[in-house]
Image: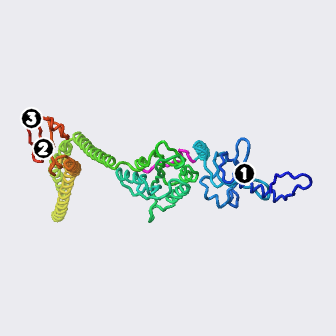
Amino acid sequence: MDLFEDTPGDNTPEFSVSEIAGTVRKLLEGEMGWVRVKGEVGRVVLARSGHLYFDLKDEKSVLSCMTWKGQVRGLELMPEEGMEVVVEGKMTASGFSSKFGLNAQRIAVAGEGALMAMLEKRKKKLAAEGLFDEGRKKPLPYLPEIIGVVTSPQGAVIRDILHRLRDRFPRKVLIWPVAVQGEACAPEVARAIEGFNALTPGGALPRPDLLIVARGGGSIEDLWGFNEEIVARAAAASNIPLISAVGHETDTTLIDFAADKRAPTPTAAAEMAVPVRLDLMGWLDAQEGRLLRGVRRGIEERGARFQGLARVLPRPETLLADPSQRLDRAADHLPRALGLMVERKRATLQNAAAGLRPRLLQTGIDQARARLDRLEDRLGAGLARAGERKGERFSALAGRLRPEGLVAQVSRQGEALDRIAPRLDSAAKTRLARLSDQLAALERTRRTLGYEATLARGYAVVRAEGAVITEAARAEGARALEIEFKDGRVSVQKTPPN
């Protein structure tokens, strides 16, 4: 049946609305079939049913597009408003509303410029949320115990990182394998970052102290997974310090801005992660030397101060001279004073006894004499004890100020210095032995790689006029040759041709 056939008069056929709609749908799907359409994405709606609806427009027209729920999962790119894309699919029409549209089954960005525009739009959006602020970025640990690496287990990237870590400072490495391009890249990388953060510190699988997200170079399409919002947000939310090492030095992705540190290459990320072990050992040796020199200098300064103070103190003989003289004078005066006192007491006794009767007088004299004897004995004992106490105090004072006491203090300082000196000497010997072992190892390496070892296997070195020759033509033209074997050299004079 020809829909546009002219039938004159009243014989024009009648069609139902459904017939017209069905005929239009058949014509549209039959004539157009599979098409590719380029345009700018307008309104985008992801329905609760799972179907995707969006508009594709240019300067003059708008084309409705739809992607059914089962087809959404196969899309490599989700459309965003303002994005310039190329859509592939089948043209179709609705049978009940007389509307046509494009069943979009493939969506791709129309050129690198559109990708960059979309990337810039995402970057501004995330920057406005504060994900790229320097204030929220964490410092890298100086020497991490465990390093987590998010990358593909195949390829040169993981080998370069492990090799560089082994050269600089070997550390424990946990690898979380992910896809580094394609539609699975972004969700897998985000899950890896979140998974490392979810580990328990000190658990059976310990939590890393540092994360490295790494990938080799590639086109902007290959690196696009690291420009997805889910990856940038996971990197910004990581509680573990994170280094981004995606692409080469000229490649820039959103994870570079969200990470705590950006490395131009995966090898550079390994260099940022750990210091050089030999440099650290050299620094420790230098600090040890500084510490020992400081201790030695402190001991010397305290010894000098002690000697200076000792010179200022007076001599012990000078301090004890006056007390000794006073003691001597008291000892000289004591017997005479005792004798005078006894004579005065005796005279007083005799005067008192003159008026007494002989018997009573004799009794009183005997009693007084006995009492006097007791007093004399007590006085002598008291004087002796007082002299002993004075002597003991004098001896104690002399002992405290004797030169031997000062010498003992100086001796103790010297003993402390003697105890430290063997440690200093042992440290110097250990350092010298280490350097000698390194020199011997280098000498063995030199001998192994030198040409003398090759001579021992049956080879020889040929020289002409002091220079080594490796070509037969130069040997033919030389007047004399010198051949070196493993045990010496032999000179060969060539006979000129007749």
Q: Is residue 233 left or right of residue 93?
A: left
Q: Given this view, does label 2 or label 3 mark the residue nearer the observer?
A: 3
Q: Is residue 224 left or right of residue 46?
A: left
Residue at left offset 46%, top offset 43%: 249
Picture coordinates of residue 91, whole percent (x, y): 70, 53
Q: Which numbered dot is residue 109?
A: none
- The amino acid type found where label 3 is placed reads Pro
Q: Is residue 138 magenta?
A: yes
Q: How is the image coloured?
A: rainbow
Farthest right residue in view: 10
Q: CA distance from mark 2 to mark 3?
A: 25 Å
Query: Could you say whether the residue bearing mark 3 is in a helix, strand or loop?
Result: loop
Q: Which residue is mark 3?
A: 497
Q: 10 Å neighbourhood of mark 3: few (<14), some, or many (≥20)?
A: few
Mark found first going from the N terminus, 2 or 1: 1
Q: Which residue is mark 2?
A: 484
Picture coordinates of residue 237, whole percent (x, y): 55, 53
Query: Could you say whether the residue bearing mark 2 is in a helix, strand or loop?
Result: strand
> Which stretch is magenta?
131-142
Q: Quadrant of residue 144?
A: bottom left
Q: Quadrant of the N terminus?
A: bottom right
Picture coordinates of residue 49, whole percent (x, y): 70, 61
- The amino acid type found where label 1 is placed reads Ser
Q: Which residue is mark 1?
A: 64
Residue 478, above or below 112: above
Depth order, front residue of 481/290: 481
